[in-house]
Every structure is written in C-alpha cells, then in structure tokens.
Image (cartoon, rainbow, N blue to C red):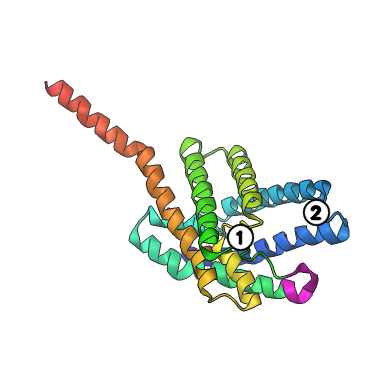
C-alpha cells in the first residue's frame, strides 16, 4: 500500500511540476509583460526557488514523493535491488505519465506557452551538457544529505540555488532540464520523444552521469559506517598487540 501511494504521489508531483514551471513563465512574460528583462528574470528565478521549497515540503510530508527520476535513481542505485526494480518499474513510469499528461493539458489550455525546452546544439554537446549538469546536482544533493540530513531549510536553499544556476548555464543549449520525465513530457507533445537525440541527451546521458556521480562521491567520501568498521578493526588490532 505504501509503495502504491508513493507511485501515485510521483505521478501527481510530476503533473504539478510541469504546470508550475509553465505558469511561472506565463505570469512573468504574459501577465507582468516583463519578457526577458533583468527584472523578469529575477522574479522568475525567485518564483522557481519558492516552488522548489514547496515541492521539497511536499516530498517531506509524503515521505519521498518526487517529480524527478534522477533524485530517486541515485538512491535506488545505492540501495537494494528490489528497490531498484520498484523505481524503474513503477516510480519513473509514473513520473513520465504525470509529465506527459500535464504538458498535454498545458498546451491545450495555454497554446502560447510554446513547445518547451529543446536541443539547440548537436547531440554530443547536448549529451555532455545534460550529463555534466546532472553530475553536478546529484553530487551536491549527496553532499548535503551526508553533511546535515535534518536541516530542511539550508538543504533546500542550497539545492534550489544550485539547480537554478545550473539551469541558467544550460538553458541556451539543452534547456538545462536535469529531469528526464519533464523532458519526455515536452518531447511527447512535440512528437520527438522516441528520437535518438531525445533518448541520448535527456535520458541516457543524465542517468549515466548520476551513476558516475554516486560512484565518485562514494569513492571520495566513504560511508561513515565503513569508516567506523575499519577504525574499529584497527583499534582491536592495536589492543591485541
């Protein structure tokens, strides 16, 4: 029951996430009429960070609900195989479906919202961009979880600012999504969701980068449990001598 509920939350979160991103743009560009002015970009960035706090709070009260496959993939990759299967067989498909349905309703309700982020460079540069962005944000998330897992505000603030900064860096190249489910939603609406470019840039590259980021983090910062076990063995050996 708990797992089925988590899948439902993932679907709902993904649906709301694509809507929130689109509504922020409509509010800044259409209602306020600020376009790409510096003031408009500041307001858009501030609303983005607020939405990140809102989703982080939702994730906390739902005990793990998520809208991004990368955030659950790295935890599944580090956990048990059954959890890995549950993530790939249930949670990620739910996130994809939530994004697809959300984008479809957005484009039907607000046609002026456009066709969403898309690839503006060649496939190799696009894959490198999304891969590096995914590597960076996963590494930051792992570091925050290790350093102070109970500090909700600080953790969410650093994560939000990091995501916003990385998104700005990649916006002109790939859209800086760092979210395969959201990318699939927009690609499905355009009809290019099964192209080599989409699958390679927005799925394969960030998922591989997530694996490399987890591996690199564990290599540089070994889990405290292993360190304590190693230290205990050294102390026992010293006492024996």
SS label for mark 1: loop
Residues marked 1 and 2 touching at CB (< 8 Å): no
Residue 148 can be seen, yes or no: yes
Q: Nearer the viewer, residue 225 or 180?
A: 180
Q: Residue at x 50, y 69 (%)?
A: 199
User: In the image, is residue 166 above or below residue 90?
Assistant: above
Q: Quadrant of residue 239?
A: top left
- Residue 44 as seen in the image, left or right of residue 72: right
Q: Which mark is residue 174?
A: 1
| Of the pair 99 and 152, the residue shown nearer to us | 99
Q: Secondary structure at mark 2?
A: loop
In the image, the segment drawn in magenta is 106-114
Neighbour class for label 2 at 10 Å: few (<14), some, many (≥20)? few
Main secondary structure of the magenta stretch: helix
Residue under the point 68% across and 67% down:
116
Against 21, residue 231 (above or below) is: above
């Amino acid at each position: 029951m708990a797992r089925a509920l988590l899948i439902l939350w993932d679907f709902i979160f993904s649906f709301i996430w694509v809507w929130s991103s689109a509504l922020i743009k409509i509010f800044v560009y259409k209602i306020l009429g600020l376009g790409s002015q510096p003031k408009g970009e500041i307001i858009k960035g501030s609303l983005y960070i607020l939405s990140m706090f809102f989703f982080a709070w939702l994730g906390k009260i739902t005990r793990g609900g998520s809208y991004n496959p990368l955030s659950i993939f790295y935890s599944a990759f580090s956990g048990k195989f059954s959890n890995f299967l549950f993530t790939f067989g249930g949670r990620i498909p739910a996130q994809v479906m939530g994004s697809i349905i959300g984008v479809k309703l957005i484009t039907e309700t607000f046609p002026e919202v456009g066709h969403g982020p898309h690839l503006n460079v060649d496939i190799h540069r696009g894959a490198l961009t999304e891969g590096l962005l995914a590597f960076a944000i996963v590494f930051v998330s792992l570091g925050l979880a290790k350093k102070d897992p109970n500090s909700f505000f600080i953790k969410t603030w650093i994560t939000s600012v990091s995501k916003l900064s990385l998104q700005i860096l990649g916006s002109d190249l790939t859209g800086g999504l760092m979210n395969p489910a959201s990318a699939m939603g927009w690609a499905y609406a355009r009809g290019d969701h099964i192209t080599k470019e989409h699958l390679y840039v927005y799925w394969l590259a960030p998922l591989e980068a997530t694996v490399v980021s987890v591996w690199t983090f564990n290599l540089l910062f070994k889990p405290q449990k292993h360190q304590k076990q190693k230290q205990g063995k050294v102390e026992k050996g010293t006492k024996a001598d």
